Image (cartoon, helix red, strand yellow):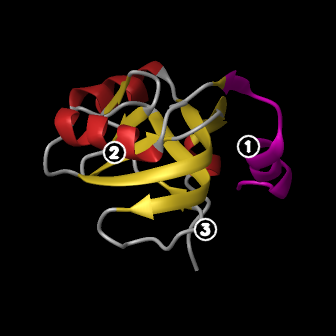
Amino acid sequence: MVTLEEVAQLLYGAGEEMAGWQGTQDELIALASKAFPGKAFCVVRQWILIDLTVNPDEKEKLTGIGLLPATLYAHEVVLDSRNRFQSGMWVRSNFGVSFSQGYMFETKSTVYLLWGSGHRKEASVATAFSMKAA
């Protein structure tokens, strides 16, 4: 069972600071469009890249099906290309499939564009995926 303390630590506790994209939103979207043509994107701020604590067997299973033991949480959606999320909402991704250039976190369906600074933290799968929209 996941405790409130574990979730609070993940959302508001200390973590490794990361820069993310420091240019304009338009520049970021243009880079993503070139790197992932036609793929949905979601520009986010105040983000947390979550490295999932998994055992070696779990890691092997994930990587065997092309997934990273990582997910992304963002306190603020800025823009979603397919209007799935409204500006100002929070979002948590599914498992990642790639993380490139320090600001593009890709899942099977979406590229999350990490605009501005954020954090990298570790959490259990249960803790990271305990956050669901009501």
User: For the residue carrying disc 2, how many other residues have a C-alpha within 10 Å: few (<14), some (14-19), or many (20+)?
Assistant: some
Q: Position of residue 99 (x, y in %)?
A: 38, 28
Mark 2 and mark 3 residues within 8 Å of each other at the beta carbon:
no
Specify which label sits upstream in the sequence, 3 or 1: 1
Left or right of 132? Residue 41 is left
Residue nearer the viewer, 96 or 65: 96
In the picture, the disc for residue 81 is none
Separation of residues labelled 2 and 3 (CA atoms): 18 Å
Q: Which residue is mark 2?
A: 29
Q: CA distance from mark 3 to mark 1?
A: 20 Å
Q: Secondary structure at mark 2?
A: helix
Q: Is residue 93 visible?
A: no
Tell me, yes or no, whether the highlighted magenta stretch contains residue 133. no
Residue 5 position, x and y percent, is 85, 50
Q: Which residue is mark 1?
A: 10
Mark on residue 88? 3
Q: Nearer the viewer, mark 1 or mark 2?
A: 2
